[in-house]
Structures are given as C-alpha cells and as structure tokens.
Amino acid sequence: MKIAVLPGDGIGTEIVAEAVKVLRALDLKLEMESALVGGAAYEAHGHPLPESTLKLAKEADAILFGAVGDWKYDKLDRPLRPEQAILGLRKHLGLFANFRPAICYEQLTHASSLKPELVAGLDILIIRELTGDIYFGQPRGRRTAVDGHFPGADEAFDTMRYSRPEIERIARVAFEAARKRNKKVTSVDKANVLETFQFWKDVVTDVHKDYQDVELEHMYVDNAAMQLVKKPKAFDVIVTGNMFGDILSDEASMLTGSIGMLPSASLNSSNQGLYEPSHGSAPDIAGKGVANPLATILSAAMMLRFSLNQEAAAQRIEAAVQKVLAQGLRTPDIYSEGTTKVGTAQMGDAVVKALAA
Ligand SMILES: NC(=O)c1ccc[n+]([C@@H]2O[C@H](COP(=O)([O-])OP(=O)(O)OC[C@H]3O[C@@H](n4cnc5c(N)ncnc54)[C@H](O)[C@@H]3O)[C@@H](O)[C@H]2O)c1
Ligand SMILES: CC(C)[C@H](C(=O)O)[C@@H](O)C(=O)O
Ligand SMILES: [Mg+2]
C-alpha cells in the first residue's frame, strides 16, 4: 500500500507529521513517500505542483495531504499560487467526490459554537462536488470593458457551470451514502437565482427516481447556512456544489468544536483518494506547535477505510482519538476549562499511546 505524503505549507508539515506517526504505529505494511507541494514546492522548484509530485500522487494508492498557501504568495500569477496545487491534484486525479463528515464527539459538545444540546450526537456528512462549478468553469479572467456602461473600466469574471454527468455522479454518491446512514439527502442550491443551480436541482430530482427509499429535500444555500446553526441535527447527508460546499463545511466545522476536527476524503471513480483536513495552512499559528492534528489524523483513518481497505485500522484510530479526548487532552482550539492544554506533537503522541492501550 503506497501512500504519497504531501505536507505542504504552514501547519501542513506539523499536522501531517503527527498523522504519519499514527500510521507508522499501526501494524501495517505502508510504504510512505513524501514530496513538496504548494509554496514549499514553488520555493524549491518554481512550481506549486511539480511534475514529480504529480507523478508520485498519481502512482500512489492514496495521498495524505496537509495544506497549502500563505498570504505572501497573493501577488503571484494565479498558476503559480500554492492553492493551484490542491486544485490541480483534484482535477488531474478526477477527485470529484469530497466527503466532509461533521461529527461532534461527546467530549467536545462544550467546545462547539452552539449550545451542547444542539450538537450532542451530531453526525452529518457534507458531500461537496469538487471538480466543477465556478472553481473550474471557463472563461475566467480580467478585461477592460470598452463598450460597457463604464467604458474603459476593468472587470473580472468567473464562470459557474455544471454538466448533467457531473451532477448525476455526485448525486448518486450522496444517495448511496445516505442509504448507509439515515436515508435523507438535502441538496443545497441557489435555484431561485442561478440557472446552474436550477439545473443542479432538476438533475438531482431526476437521479432521485432511482433512490425512492431515500428522502430528498431541496434547500437554498442561504437558508442552509442558517439551518445549520439553528437545528444542525435535522440534516443527515448534504450534497452541494464546489463553492457552497467549501463554505458550508467550514461553518459546520464549528459545530464539532473546531475546524481542526474536520477531516476529509476526496475520491475519484476508482476509489483512489486524497485525504486532507478541511482547514488550510493557518499561517497565523504555523510554527508554534499548537495546531490541532486531529482532523489530519482522522483523515488518515478515512484513507485506511476508503482507499486501503483497512476498516479495522480506521476504527482503531477513531477510537484512539476519542480516548485522548476522554482523557481531557485539548489543543488550544478546543480547550475549555477543566481540560489539559497540549501542543500538536503531544496530541499526536497521545493518540499513538492510545492505539497501543
Ligand atoms: N486544502 C488546503 O490546502 C487549504 C484549505 C483552506 C485554506 N487554504 C489556504 O490556507 C491559507 C490560510 O487560509 P485561512 O486562514 O483562510 O484558513 P485556515 O483554515 O488556514 O485558518 C482559518 C483559522 O482557523 C485556524 N485553524 C485552521 N486549522 C487549524 C488547526 N488544525 N488547529 C487550530 N486552528 C486551526 C487558523 O489558525 C485560523 O485562525 C490560505 O492561503 C488558504 O488559501 C488551504
Ligand atoms: C485552498 C482552497 C483551494 C480550498 C478550496 O476552496 O477548495 C480549501 O478552502 C478547501 O476547503 O479545501
Ligand atoms: Mg475551504
């Protein structure tokens, strides 16, 4: 089982080191090879996604990814920006289905941004389409409008688009996932304003004909953002487009206690996957040894489950995470009175220890 390890930038290196520690502590034959990606690769090779990194990723059974980006690269031409590395990996590998489970662990109900009773037992799954939408639609760019209302004024534009097959396949992923859960899918759109999302809604409704045992509800994204904090447990599976999924998953992370708790899996049609926390490189806390590594460690568990066929090992990691939380260990982002504040490496070490116990 070959794993490409791509730590990236900022806290990416710190949190991936802990996930690798946990993977090595399992009794599995895992071959792990690391490569530079993002700003780190740009510094060394002049490109955020060098050919060698892409090749390693393509040939691996699974990819463990940290995070990319830093404000210092904001002025670079877009193709050279660190974020293009993760977008390129998703596109090149066809990783269209992004699973972002928002689970509030029992021990963290008080760390949530909501009242404990609203999040106790919370277990929702956001399924975000990951290779389409306004993220990848063409044309995009900037131009000087010479015949518009404001002659000579500059403008910028991006294109929101989805094709029927793109919507159909993500809808099927969502209905299949719901079948194994509580049989309810909420499709989030903005059909009242955007043609792309009226089409999304129509296609999801068509696909639903094959899944009559699953309840389908449609919701506008603005309402969904509100309902997520009003009554999050009313959701089971949320399926949505690339941009809405990006935003709603960050929102949902705070129901679980912290963005540092939200893992993710991005799969293609052959179940090859890239596994990364849902958060970014957190330049504000990078290098301080305080980042929460649990989202990355839980992403490694998802990797074992989805791409490496190691369900038992995945469950061992998840149980170990629950155990360290039950021991009261907390990185600063999930700290509350009466618990013990630890750093990134201490948290990783504690998970390794809990695996052994
Ligand atoms: N997939 C990715 O690689 C990815 C994802 C999101 C953002 N980014 C990039 O990361 C950079 C920073 O973006 P941002 O600040 O908007 O988002 P961010 O997710 O990096 O950070 C947002 C906030 O959450 C905190 N945070 C994030 N992860 C944490 C963790 N594990 N433990 C504790 N606190 C954590 C940060 O300290 C910060 O206050 C940007 O360059 C952005 O493009 C990359
Ligand atoms: C870094 C950025 C390209 C990325 C996205 O928008 O998909 C990030 O926010 C995420 O959620 O993985
Ligand atoms: Mg995001």
Image: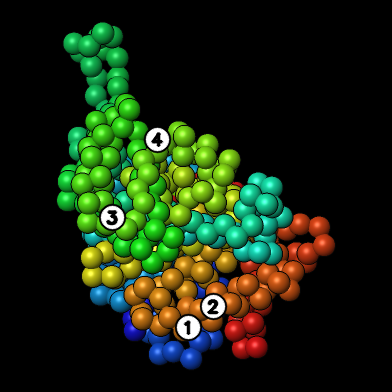
Check if mark 2's residue and mark 1's residue have beta carbons within 8 Å.
yes
| Residue occupied by mark 2 | 317
Which one is nearer the viewer's eye here, 20 or 98?
A: 98
Helix, strand, or loop for circle 1? helix
Residue lying at the far right in this picture: please name it.
338
Residue 241 found in image quarter: top left
Q: Residues within 10 Å of mark 2 (few under 14, many from 20)?
A: many
Residue 112 x, y percent position in the rendering: 65, 52
At x 78%, y 64%, the residue is 339
Please state the horizontal and vertical placement of residue 309, each as a whole percent of the image: 36, 81
Whether residues under marks 2 and 3 lie with C-beta atoms below 8 angstroms apart, the answer is no
For disc 1, the marked residue is 313
Q: CA distance from mark 2 to mark 3?
A: 35 Å
Q: Quadrant of residue 177?
A: bottom left
Callout 2 amino acid: Ile
Q: Residues within 10 Å of mark 4 (few under 14, many from 20)?
A: some
C-alpha separation, residue under disc 4 versus residue under disc 3: 22 Å
Q: Is residue 125 visible?
A: yes
Which residue bears the numbered disc 3?
212
Q: CA distance from mark 2 to mark 1?
A: 6 Å
Looking at the image, which residue sits at the far front?
A: 213
